[in-house]
Image (cartoon, rainbow, N blue to C red):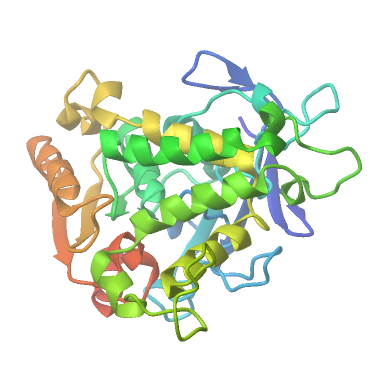
Amino acid sequence: MATHAEPSTSGHVLDLPQPLPLDSGRSLAGVRVAYETYGTLNADKSNAILICHALTGDQHVASPHPITGKPGWWIRMVGPGLPIDTDRYFIICANVIGSCMGSSGPASMADDGRPYGMRFPVITIRDMVRAQIALVDALGIDKLHAVVGGSMGGMQVLSLAANFGDRLNAALVIASTSRHSAQNIAFHEVGRQAIMADPAWANGEYYADGVDDPRKVGPEAGLAVARMAAHITYLSEQGLTEKFGRRLQDRDAKTFGFDADFQVESYLRYQGLSFTDRFDANSYLYITRAMDYFDLAEEHGGKLADAFAGTKARFCLVSFDTDWLYPTSESRTIAHALNAAGLPVSFVELSAPYGHDSFLLDVPELDRVVEGFLR
């Protein structure tokens, strides 16, 4: 049984009293889960919604980010009177283990008083979910009204429904997949190699003594390139063309050099450099590896429908027509498996020009789908 969660100056943290068992066969002692809550838990604790974040997301779904000061990553979706209504629901969002925003990860201190670095055990999506269930237990919640997530968050939703099927009434999976394709793995490997090729990575031992924020040292160039490569996969060709085309950046003619001549080059460089201010390179390695290992059918005997045998939850799957990272065919495969398992499922493909990132952006039809399904 988990201990009760204790508040911290930057939100809430839960320290697990028992080691967390991992899919690798190892266990992780001293696990900390950092989380935020919004709204009020009702008397019978039946109005809780767990929101699961994506790869570079965090627990600050509807509150300012403590490092960047930017608004929460889903501020347009979560709040009073919004589709995920904090006047109606009690919202929980936890930072996944392996990350760098307060939950246990490679930047955390090991028993010897030094950061784990690459000694941190490799974790999986299911391991992340185990830690989230420990948090739900600590909050005294037996069954969640719903679990919601996009992208890697959707993987967590599927994993929770498959492995803790009696702990939720509804599952909302947006722009996600039940397994990573070879192409998905390939893009992640480019990013990991960019990080590990940076001399400042130093085999993951770049955390300097006396530096309060280890994200300010280390393989910033490699991490920036990794972010640039990944960010391309989150966008659509249509969106890139409309936003940038072949327009030049702050100049009237090409320089015939290797500066950022084009607007799209400047944009990607900005995305890469700004990312290094808030994210740990080792965490990027660990979380992308967890995503690559994700294969829900493989975890349950090779048949995706069998993964959902232990739940009675209702499901909603949402895809976007311009998402080529997790295309509609991936959501359709999940829908077929849920149908085969005899579970209630609704499935919709929405039209949006933004590619994979559409779930984070202004798509009014998504708002209507989310609000309608949760009610």
Outermost residue on the bottom side: it is 252
Answer above or below: position of 173 versus 26.
below
The answer to which quarter of the image holds residue 262 is bottom left
Relative image position of residue 245 (x, y in whole percent): 32, 76
Relative image position of residue 259 (x, y in whole percent): 54, 66
Relative image position of residue 286 (x, y in whole percent): 54, 34
Q: Closer to the camera, 191 or 28?
A: 191
Q: Quadrant of the N terminus?
A: top right
Q: Closer to the camera, 293 or 354?
A: 354
- Would you say 31 lies left or right of 132 here? right
Outermost residue on the right side: it is 210
Q: Closer to the camera, 18 or 233?
A: 233
Is residue 24 visible in the rendered structure shown here?
yes
Q: Residue at x 67, y 33 (%)?
A: 106
Q: Residue at x 45, y 33 (%)?
A: 290
Q: Residue at x 59, y 62 (%)?
A: 60
Relative image position of residue 147 (x, y in whole percent): 38, 52
Q: Which residue is drawn at 12% across and 35% down?
A: 341
Answer above or below: position of 102 versus 355.
above
Is residue 166 visible in the rendered structure shown here?
no
Outermost residue on the front side: it is 256
Q: Closer to the camera, 237 or 1?
A: 237
Q: Quadrant of the C terminus?
A: bottom left
